Amino acid sequence: MGRPSKLKLPRPPAGTSRRGFFQRSGAAVALASAAALPLAAVAGRGKDSRQGASVFQHGVASGDPLQDRVILWTRVTPANPAAVVPVQFELALDPGFANTVARGSTRTDASRDFTVKVDPARLRPGTTYYYRFFVGSEASPIGRTRTLPAGATQRLRMAVASCSNHAAGYFNAYRRIAERADLDLVVHLGDYLYEYGPNVYGSVRTPEPPNEMVTLSDYRLRHAQYKRDADSQALHRQHPVVCIWDDHEITNDAWVGGAENHTEGAEGTWSERVSLGLQAYYEWMPIRPRDVRPAVGDPRRNERAFRIGDLVELVMLEQRLSARSQQLPATVPTPFGQGFVQTGEFLNPARTLLGAEQEAWLATRLRTSPARWKFIGQAVMFAQLKLQGAPLAAGGGVFVNTDQWDGYQPARDRVYDMLKGGNGQPPVDNVVVLTGDIHSSWAADLTQDPNNPNVATGGYNGATGEGSRAVEFVGTSITSPGLNDPAGNTAAFLRSVNPHFKYIELNQRGYMLLDVTRERTVCEWWYVDTVAAPSNVQTFGTAFEVQHGSNRLQPSAMTTPPANPPALAP
């Protein structure tokens, strides 16, 4: 949330478009194939997971789990930067590696910044595994991961994170997530790292390199800094992560042809900058760079889906680099800065966030998935957010942020058409939208016309939730600043204008925890006490849930973790 002006000067953020209201209110890397490694080759190696600190400075990670495989990641710091480094790995059912189920070897070198990915297959569904890497006799830390379940699945428990700005503070929320042994996976919704130089958007810690990310070396060095962070390493070591980028992985307010924080020429071409940023992203993140998507040759196309038994279809959307139309300016003056109304080019049906192909893919996933719940993981808020409310028939009111779905209303209407059905298509129920980006916490019923109280004409009843077609849970940031609203006055004002929001909290940093059964999905908001210094304090904020078939929110309570979860990695 928030960003500096386009000037490359170390000064406090001051925006005129994306998220500015809140401030004014207060190159794909190649996968290494797993080759057979003789058992004797690793015999006698030490079991101490703290070995190899000089070689494995960036820890280990896993991600993109499927029912029979999962990406395992590490990075080697070589003694010789010109070397080709052989790397071995082990995968076991126990943290002591008494029951090893896979071993393999690969190589890495400077062409992929000495990062390593393996994708061991033929694993058991719904199973926790432990893994480690070796370079010679040096062992990496031990990691813990888990495959997705197959068939009948009764429960899923996962954390949701976003907006982890190293310069803005300490990743205390990552550590709290790492300590939860009962999680099946973690979803990161973008802004995993930020592009700015020192004292531009955060001054708690100094970014590396000490300038804005523009070159391949810049992007790699920033990823390396984030992966050296102890709390980040703890998160990745204990849980598989499913991630999608937002804008700051390249630069602020990105769209298919450019970005607010990109100067063409002085910072190279936009296509070159995207290519370099994505090359580093695919190298440094535990993400599978090839998927079942048809556009396998385009690194900008990273939408993908994960089938979590018959319980959840997790659909991850790419909303920045593959098709997004440029953001329009907000030109309507309000007491809180510039807003906008839905007229003129804002109503152009050609404007898109996803592009026609991704929209069609999303529709197919929602309509055909056999899973009980359909989760949409994405970056920017889907619910309407207004400064002045009005029914659609009267123009809809005054909106806040042109960078979120409000700036692309015809595209959002097409998603609502998917949910409502018609033209021979059935309606889609049990859709839960998961969102990051805005550095604050929100729970919303999703309705096209929230300020129209007449449900019969497509409106919404704020008291009962009737007229809602789905729900949205928006998570706050790991560190990036929100709004100083300690008394809740701004939140109360926004709720008075936007009756579909059931919860708004604008101050605190933390994460969401989702507990899913066949009968309900509960979202809990958990908050840390500070990001200004390391801390182990977290508190439960609140919880809301959606019942199977209801498509609307109701208050809930903290859930009970399952008993006897698999042991954390040592």
Image (cartoon, helix red, strand yellow):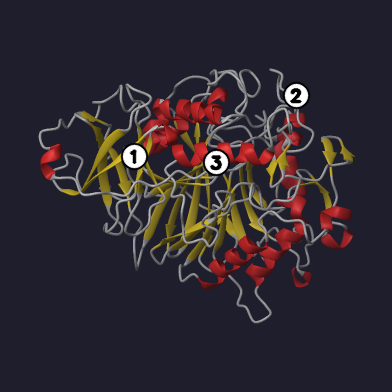
Please name the residue that numbered disc 2 is placed on: 7
Q: What residue type is labelled 1?
A: Gln
> Is 525 or 12 nearer to us in this picture?
12
Give whichever of 315, 429 is nearer the camera.
Answer: 315
Label 2 SS? loop
**Which label's residue is closer to the chain start, 3 or 1?**
1
Compared to 151, does 324 lie above or below? above
Q: Which percent across, then down, holds residue 203?
A: 59, 18
Give the quadrant of the C terminus.
top left
* Residue 357 visible to an observer of this rendering: yes
Residue 483, picture quadrant: top right
Q: Is mark 3 on a helix, strand or loop?
A: helix
Above or below, comparing residue 400 to residue 343 in the picture:
above
- The quadrant of the image that shows the N terminus is top right
Q: Mark 1 = which residue?
A: 238
What is the CA distance from the residue labelled 2 to the residue labelled 1? 40 Å
Q: Is residue 248 left or right of residue 52?
A: right
